[in-house]
Image (cartoon, grey):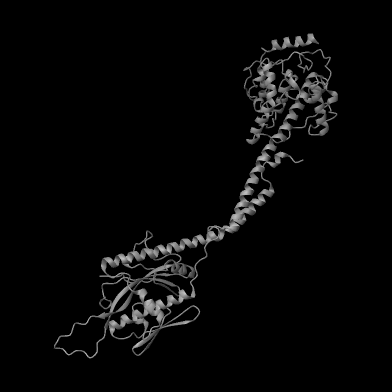
Amino acid sequence: VSNPADRRGATFADLVVFLATLSLAAALLYPAWSARGFREQVATAVADVEAVSTAARRALQQSGQWPEAAPPGVAPPELAGLSGEGSAFSRIDYRVGWTSWNVVDSVEVVQPPPAPEDTPPETFGRVMAPVPRSVGGVSIHSGDPALLAELTEHFAGEPTFVLDSMWMLVLTERSTTPVGER
Amino acid sequence: VARKKKKRKHRSQQQATAPAVSSAPATGDVVPSRPAPVSVDAAPVGESTAAAAPPDAPPEGSAEPGANGPPRPTALDEAAPAIEDLDADLDLDDVGGSYDSLVAAVAGLEDDPPPRPSARNGRPPGTEVEVEEVHDLDDEDTAATVDRLIAQVGRGRPAVPPSKDPEEDIPVIDLDDDVPAVPARAASAAAAQPTADMERLARAAAAGALDDRDPPPIPLDLGNVSTPEARARLLAEALAHAEHKEARYRVPLADARRVGRLKSAAASVLIVAAGVVALAPPAWVQPQPPAVLSEGARARGIRLALLLQAHQVEAYRVRTQQLPVSLDDLPVKLDGVRYARSGRSYQLVGFTPDGEAIVYDAADPSPPFRVLEGALTPLHGGP
């Protein structure tokens, strides 16, 4: 007959079962734990893109022009100091870029009515004239395709594209200054 | 016999006011740590055991807490010890943690008994006596012997015939005494002592204060026990030992049942959790896989990039009235886009990761590019 006093605490079998359960739980939760870090990275990138977009639109409203383009990882003067870290354009996992694009729209030119003494034109047709404008672009440069895909999925309703290791969000706002005069 | 009884009672009353006898263990005595309140109740032997209380107990409060140990328990200081006081006295913490003190308290003897072989053989201390037979109370035979002794006590017969020793000052367990030696109040309290002791032992075991170690084996030399003192000490020692062993085997069982219930509850929770995770894994267990860009979305993105690059060429043409020689002439150039000029028209070529070429012809853009043209239109008009 074993001493009942020996049965008060945990036995070796209890310890083995406990450690096995702990190992299984850790193996089960590790993928979720590692994916949590990736989710935080995506959330940070989304926050950076939204911050740059908001600041660029604010600069457009104030000055009538998009901020000047800058290389990836370098913040334009109008967009500097967006975060408390001094610059939100350079992260460990990615770099943020800002680009100003020229876009040319074909606009129908309204012809003045011909004078009575003028000879009517032989043919009547629409006259299209190119009107340049500019759009902005917030880009994320990263070697992680999953991050770029997540950004594309997050900004599904916006004009975005992925080219090589760059993801870009096109900001469509009309610029007041024609391209040719800048 | 009746005169002897009366004489002993009279002497007990006279000695009630005698000076206290220190019960603390002698200096240098190695006292085993016994924090558990092991008690010896009078239930196994009836009220007769209570009659074994020391008639020469000192008055209460007369013990001196000297350098030899804690003060003498209160029960032994009383002239007429009650059973509940005797039980309180048998707490090893109060007695000083000495197993011999416990035995002495039961037997009503002094705390500093002579060496066992000498006392049992009636020889003076210091005399080397070879113990003929040593009984361990853990042994079944010895336990049977103890049970027999207890049974004899319970039947009212002394375990050993009274000694003819004229020294009548030595207290003996007078089991034939018809006059109750304890008040009725004490007798009723004695009946409640086992339950109280069990509860107290249970609390002590729960607090981890019960000593699990075996008490030292008691050498029993039943054949050479001749003095009443030795017999009383032997009986008390056996009772204390039996009570201690019983307490050890009784209290931890309840604790083991409690641990078993906890283990069962933990196992049930674990099984339920495993079932939930297996059948309906929550999001924090099965994370959402990272997004993968589809081929269609990638091709659409390349077309949008080509269209955006074409707008740069058109802006250059509006500004300079001619096509750029290469994309390096443009202020913004996308990597991975090829440019081919032919007369007044041009083509832009992009490639998917699979190597498929996507061509933008400025002279006749394909329908997908016309659809994407709307993506570049302003959401709301400017000034």
- Of residues B128 and A129, the one nearer the viewer is A129
- Of residues A39 and B239, the one nearer the viewer is A39
Q: Residue at the far left: name it.
A: A117
**Viewport quadrant of the N terminus of chain A:** top right
Q: Determine if residue A32 is in view.
A: yes
Q: Quadrant of residue B193?
A: top right
Coordinates of residue B128 in the picture (x, y in percent): 82, 26
Q: Quadrant of residue B93?
A: top right
Q: Is residue A117 above or below residue B5?
A: below
Coordinates of residue B173 in the picture (x, y in percent): 77, 18
**Viewport quadrant of the C terminus of chain A:** bottom left
Q: Is residue B360 above or below residue B25?
A: below
Q: Determine if residue B36 is in view.
A: no
Q: Is residue A53 above or below residue B242?
A: below
Q: Residue at x 26, y 69 (%)?
A: A64
Question: Is residue B44 shown left or right of residue B349?
Answer: right
Question: Is residue B319 shown left or right of residue B52?
Answer: left
Q: Quadrant of residue B324?
A: bottom left
Question: Is residue B310 shown left or right of residue B188?
Answer: left
Q: Residue at x 84, y 18 (%)?
A: B161
Coordinates of residue B376 in the picture (x, y in percent): 35, 74
Q: Residue at x 64, y 54 (%)?
A: A20
- Of residues B160 and B278, the one nearer the viewer is B278
Coordinates of residue B340 in the picture (x, y in percent): 39, 86
Question: Is residue A57 shown left or right of residue B58?
Answer: left
Q: Number of numbered discs present?
A: 0
